Image (cartoon, rainbow, N blue to C red):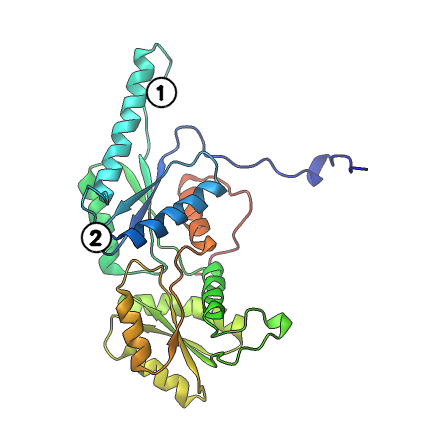
Amino acid sequence: MPRPRQPGRHRRPEPLAAPEGAPALVLAVPGAPSAATRGLAEEIVSIARSELPGLDARIGYVDGDDTEFPTLQAVLAHAADERTARYEQALAAGVEATEPEGPVGVVVPLLAGPDAALLRQVRQAVMDSRVAAELTDVLGPHPLLAEALHVRLSESGLARADRARLFTVATAADGIVLASVGGEEAVQAAGITGMLLAARLAVPVMAAALDQEGSVASVAEQLRSAGSQQLALAPYLIGPEIDAALIEAAAAEVDCSAAEPLGAYPAIGKLALAKYTTALGIAPQQPLGAPVR
């Protein structure tokens, strides 16, 4: 027999939906646009939409061309024009409508950690659009990014998938170089997530900067001096923000294997949505876990 529906606090919470007329979530994608980049961004946006029905989510490219890959400025301007058109159509139809106020969009940079140069580009693009838009912080540091890094390492055979099951991997690394971009600020932010990853793997994790000469080699030497014999490079990157060849070159320089970038791991879409809902003061249906500061 089916169980009777539980009243009161035992009832499942009503699913959260985007408020009517809410600003668009605009994913700001850095790096050189490509078909692969577009596919990744679309998958992340799809994850965000599945978490918040009714979400107006769009993709703007920092280095777009306004044809195949629309620039961030163009996407924001188009969202503003659409909002104005809806308001004017409502007035023309005799429908009572309130003149739109507040931001047209909430811009979420597709970056795991801080990168001052890329963030300046995103900020400039928002200013150039001449549209009222809110710019959020980057996605990390956050416990879910440590989980994503663990999964990418395990997929590459460089870490055990689950410590509880004592699943051993012959190629499992005993030291992790956490590779970021964005200079020293990015290294410090990556180090916070690195501590969470070290707790998951029970191996030392140290952050390095791919865009600083000698940084990866220096960190690899420190890990080996401390006793690590088999290193692995874990990119603390979504993917589009850097040429993949730099990751391969860094791994070759220190003679170790590299995991794949974070890519469209489900947590990336959820974190992008969390930045959006926090900016708008919308309570999430299920908390993602406290972000790390």
Q: Is residue 229 left or right of residue 215?
A: right
Q: 234 and 211: which one is in front? A: 234
Residue at x 29% of width, y 66% of height: 244
Mark 2 in CB contact with mark 1 (< 8 angstroms): no
Q: Position of residue 159 (x, y in %)?
A: 50, 74
Q: Callout 1: helix, strand or loop?
A: loop
Q: Nearer the viewer, residue 91 or 160?
A: 160
Residue ID for mark 1: 98
Residue 137 on image: x %, y %: 35, 52
User: Observer-nearest residue: 70 or 106?
Assistant: 70
Classify 83 as above or below 51: above
Vertical relation: 222 (above or below) 122: below
Residue beneath the point at 26% across and 53% down: 34
Point 22% across, 54% down: residue = 120
Query: Horizontally, is 71 left or right of 290 in the view?
Result: left
Q: Residues within 10 Å of mark 2 (few under 14, many from 20)?
A: some
Q: Pick the quarter of the image with the N terminus.
A: top right
Residue 259's spot in the image, x, y percent?
40, 70
Question: Is 76 drawn above or below residue 122 in the view shown?
Answer: above
Q: Position of residue 37 (x, y in %)?
A: 30, 53
- Residue 95: image quadrant is top left
Q: Nearer the viewer, mark 2 or mark 1?
A: 2
Looking at the rendering, in which quadrant would you find the C terminus? bottom left
Q: Amino acid at mark 2?
A: Gln
Identify residue for label 2: 121
For residue 228, what is the image quadrant?
bottom left
